[in-house]
Image (cartoon, rainbow, N blue to C red):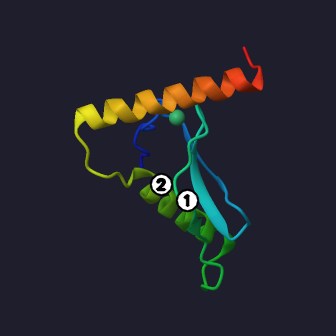
Amino acid sequence: MTPLPCPFCGGTEVSVVEGSTFRWSVAECDGCGARCGEIRVNTTSAMSWNERAAAAKADAIDEWNRRAPMTEQQSDALVDAWNQGYETGRNEAGFT
Ligand SMILES: [Zn+2]
């Protein structure tokens, strides 16, 4: 299961990390921190811990790869909006 490039920064390094609690997993872009929706880890099945972790990772990547169909123009506008917000946030936080 290969994660698609990040829709915001184009980064290809995507990690699956713990979500809001250990029962949730989420795929996160290593480049800009964008995340997909959290997926629930199946903690009640008879699977081993390692099998659950592998299944949760696959589900999180599936979620990351789920994209709404959009035109190239819409995609460019989304990236522009993200970059503008990112720069604004950086400036407001005093990062250089
Ligand atoms: Zn990114």
Question: Is the residue marked 2 within 8 Å of ligand 1, measured from its CB?
Answer: no
Q: Is residue 10 shown to the viewer in this render? A: no
Residue 96 relative to residue 87: left or right: right
Q: Verify CB contact (< 8 Å) between mark 2 and mark 1.
A: yes
Residue at the outermost top position = 96
Residue 8 x/y as whole percent: 46, 34
**Residue 51, quarter of the rendered image:** bottom right
Question: Is the residue marked 1 within 8 Å of ligand 1, measured from its CB?
Answer: no
At x 53% / y 67%, what residue is drawn? 55
Residue 69 x/y as whole percent: 26, 49
Which residue bears the numbered disc 1? 57
Q: Residues within 10 Å of mark 2 (few under 14, many from 20)?
A: many
Q: Secondary structure at mark 2?
A: helix
Q: Is residue 63 above or below residue 47?
A: above
At x 74% / y 66%, what residue is drawn? 21
**Residue 89, quarter of the rendered image:** top right
- Kind of residue sitting beneath label 2: Ile
Which residue bears the numbered disc 2? 61
Residue at the outermost left position = 71
**Residue in the foreground of this view, choosing between 80 and 6:** 80
Residue 52 x/y as whole percent: 60, 71
Q: Secondary structure at mark 1?
A: helix
- Kind of residue sitting beneath label 1: Lys
Residue 32 x/y as whole percent: 59, 33
